[in-house]
Amino acid sequence: MKRVAATAMLLALATSAAQADNENCRKSREYLLGTPGGDQALTPQAYNDLFKICVAASAMPNVKDAYILRDGGIAVIPKQDSVSATAATLAQFCDDYPRGVLRFITRKEQPAIRSVTDVARMSSTSSTPCKKIKGIS
């Protein structure tokens, strides 16, 4: 009986941790879908599809936080900012989403971020798309 209770407790903790990881994905999607004046770069369905990618990216080992960007990219704050950790994260992302774009938020940019909307408005144009990295046309 104790084992069942312990398992249930662990599942509850894991679920709440996963929901916390998804929080910024959800908030950025809500902001983008609720932007007044039709300032959306993509269709609502595209943002819903990006939400699934964002949630998966937030679960990657080197990702502290993930967000959906207005232009269709995914922004992440890495746990480790080393070249090897960043390269491994980018490789994993591009293997899973060969048509995606992953933008790393640098340490210098982080202090300027006051809310999820600040990130959602960022551009991913300075990031190399996975199509180019993988040589897909």
Image: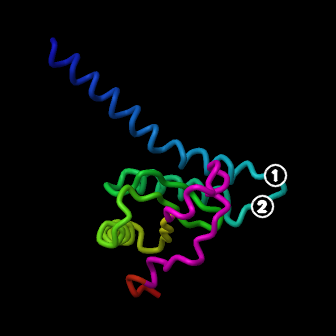
* Residue bearing mark 1: 36
Q: Nearer the viewer, residue 78 or 51?
A: 78
Q: At numbered mark 1, what does the secondary structure look like: helix, strand or loop?
A: loop
Q: Amino acid at mark 2?
A: Asp
Q: Which residues are magenta?
A: 106-132
For this orientation, the residue located farthest to the top is 1
Determine which of the numbered discs, if any, sits on residue 39 in the image: 2
Quadrant in which residue 6 is drawn: top left
* In magenta stretch: residue 121: yes
Quadrant in which residue 8 is drawn: top left
* Residue in view at x 41 percent, y 59 percent: 78
Q: At numbered mark 2, what does the secondary structure look like: helix, strand or loop?
A: loop
> Does 14 sit above or below residue 36?
above
Relative image position of residue 26 (x, y in whole percent)? 56, 45
Q: Are marks 2 and 1 in contact (CB under 8 Å)?
A: yes
> Does 19 sit above or below residue 137?
above
Please rate how many residues cluster around mark 1, counting C-alpha atoms within 10 Å: few if below 14, some from 14 to 19, many from 20: few
